[in-house]
Image (cartoon, helix red, strand yellow):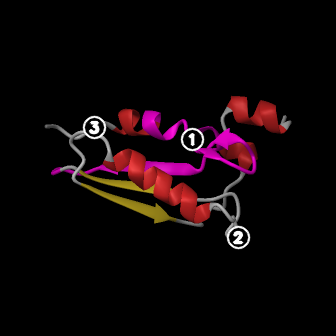
Amino acid sequence: MPAPTKEQIMEVLRPIYDPEIRLGIVDLGLVYDVVVHDGGKVEVKMTLTTPACPYGEILVAQVHREVAALEGVREVEVLLVWDPVWDPETMASDYAKDVLGIW
């Protein structure tokens, strides 16, 4: 079974939302990159709204669970990064900016 594409992975991550902001992590721009390697290994590079986010462990676990459930995925690594620092003005989708009142 072939591994899923980056686009397919982003779609399964779209429903995961930050409980404090009540917006999806993809719309917020918290998912920086997805790399699909040969053999079904997937790396997801993501950040949180702040290093002290009380839901960080939960969000990372949800990302891991959703990606691991996809057919063709044999291994998942979620890399929590802080560089670049999350900036909703430049990283969030237009929808998220509208909800957050950023314009």
> What range is drawn magenta here?
11-39
Cβ atoms under marks 1 and 2 closer than 8 Å: no
Q: Earlier in the sequence, mark 1 or mark 2?
A: 1
Q: Residue at x 65, y 43 (%)?
A: 28
11 up-or-down from 48: above or below: above
Q: Residue at x 50, y 59 (%)?
A: 60
Q: Residue at x 22, y 41 (%)?
A: 3
Mark 3 = which residue? Answer: 4
Query: Identity of the amino acid at label 2?
Result: Ala
Q: Is residue 83 visible?
A: no
- Three-letter amino acid code at disc 3? Pro
- x, y percentage for residue 6? 36, 39
Separation of disc 1 and disc 2 at Cα? 19 Å
Circles 1 and 3: CB distance less than 8 Å? no
Along the horizontal axis of the image, is 22 left or right of 103? left
Alpha-carbon neighbours of circle 2 within 10 Å: few (<14), some, or many (≥20)?
A: few
Between residues 87 and 1, which one lies in front from this camera angle? 1
Q: Residue at x 48, y 41 (%)?
A: 13
The quadrant of the rendering that contains the C terminus is: top right
Residue under pointer 2: 52
Horizontal and vertical percent position of residue 52: 70, 70
Please give the residue where the numbered disc 1 appears in the rendered image: 26
Please say if 38 is above or below 80: above
Q: Secondary structure at mark 2?
A: loop
The answer to whether residue 98 is left or right of residue 53 is right
The tag earlier along the polypeptide, 1 or 3, is 3
